[in-house]
Image (spheres, coloured by chain):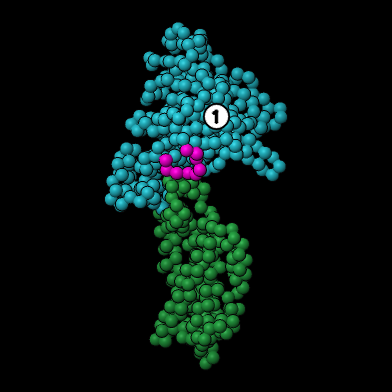
Amino acid sequence: MTFVKALGASLLRVAFGFGLSILFGVAIGIAIAGSRAASWLLSPVVMGVQSLPSICWLPLAALWFQRDENAILFVILMGSIGSIVIATRDGLKNVPTTYRRVSSTFGANYWQRLFWVYIPSALPAFISGMKQGWSFAWRSLLAGELIKSVVGVGGQIEISRSIGDYERLFASMILVLLASVIVDKLLFTQLEKRIRARWGMAA
Amino acid sequence: MPQLTTASPSLETRPFAPTHPTPVPLAPGAAKVELRGVSKIYSTGAKRFAALSEIDLAIRDGEFLAIVGPSGCGKSTLLNLIAGFECPDSGEVFFEGQAVTGAGPERLVLFQEHGLFPWLNVRQNVEFGLRVRGLSKAERRERAEHYLKMVHLQKFKRSYPFQLSGGMKQRTAIARALAVEPRMLLMDEPFSALDPRTRDILHLELQRLWMATRKTIVFVTHSVEEAVRLADRIVVMASQPGRIRSVFEVALPHPREFMDPALVELRGAILRELEDELGKLVKKEGDDDWRIEEKSIGARARRDLDFGLGDGI
């Protein structure tokens, strides 16, 4: 039963952290794609964050945040936001010229173009980036949970190690693997499939 | 036999000789679109390339104008300037008396790559322009269905673009364009990517739609055949630098009979105009020793073959 509780806690944590990452990442990605000034300002920062292994943020996060929960969330955010920003930016930058011209010849204003044309057009590329971001988020979560003692699958692994229960250790590892694969298959792959089917792209 | 009219009575041996080898005089206030002294220069590094040079053109309200020319003559650039996608480096572009500052639905453009949005189905694509305008869902639906009926695509309104053929996609694009009731249509080689039989069908369709709506249409194409089938007036462009070479008036009734010998004659006349363009193209795109023989394409009409055209034609 502790397994289920632990898994639940971990999934909640990573969902929240990843959700924040998407929120901020998409906003930053749109800004970078649209404005040269924003790109000049933010791109180096994002690149830096992306190249730093997310676990390196944990000591700092532990200092900034009172609660271990929030520190881990921060680590998840830092680990996955880079992929989201890059996916958003690339998707938007690669909107075909024809779509841009179609939207402007019909007289669409900036917001109409962004939400009705550019973002839908960028969606396939975005989904691919999101899958990558998810795997980074999951890794960041586990790194954080292994170090900080919180209720979660990482915690289970750590507890198993410390009491010498190696069966439990392996079971926890397999659980982690299964959880990640199931979410990927159920959520992201299905989403990608549906979008590609509608666009008529090869499966 | 269709009645042929010529603008100049002295040209009985060449019925479709160009009527305006010099710049078209601009009728004050009567033109839908005017270009005055328009030039467009592209520079890559140190090289400057004149895509368009000193273009003067007046487009009449309700006319079907074709712009024909070889690749690189600036015909797409000309369309982009009228559409508002680009600005001229010198000269001015006017639409209904006002200077053109950007793109807009009053001068709607149709593209060679139909530009349908793959995430929307046929009806939603046609509704796009109406959604931009802010029409209600019911109004949009009604209008979209009306225009889909006009292009005979009612049955496919729920299909997605990837399920349609090239011709169907272009018809959807036409319905999408007509739905916003633009004051002018700018078509940039819309049928160039389609097979010849589909093009035949679409040529008939376009004529039918034009006869029903009488929109001003500017149709850019590299196919002289297409231009003579569709247009009332044909602007022939030359390249290096891009400029108007001549303008042909085509006083034949719509819908045009594709096999009409008069069209063949007209095509021949235009191809003769474009003959030295071939030499330029060959020079630009091949080895220095490659030459095209003079008069090998667009040859003089065979007078000895009697098609029953009669005298003085």
Which type of secondary structure does the marked residue at label 1 adopt?
Answer: strand
The residue lying toward the viewer, choosing from A18 and B210, is: B210
**Image hue for chain B:** cyan
| Picture residue at 37% right of the left edge, 43% below the top | B180
Q: Amino acid at mark 1?
A: Asp
Residue B164 appears left or right of B298: left
Read off the magenta span: B98-106
Q: Quadrant of the N terminus of chain B?
A: top left
| Picture residue at 43% right of the left edge, 71% below the top | A182
x%, y% of residue A181? 46, 71
Q: Residue furthest front?
A: B28
Q: Is residue B110 visible?
A: no
According to the image, label 1 marks what residue?
A: B56
Chain shaded green: A
x%, y% of residue A184? 45, 68
| Picture residue at 45% right of the left edge, 52% below the top | A109
Q: Is residue B101 magenta?
A: yes
Residue B25 appears left or right of B121: right
| Picture residue at 65% right of the left edge, 33% below the top | B285
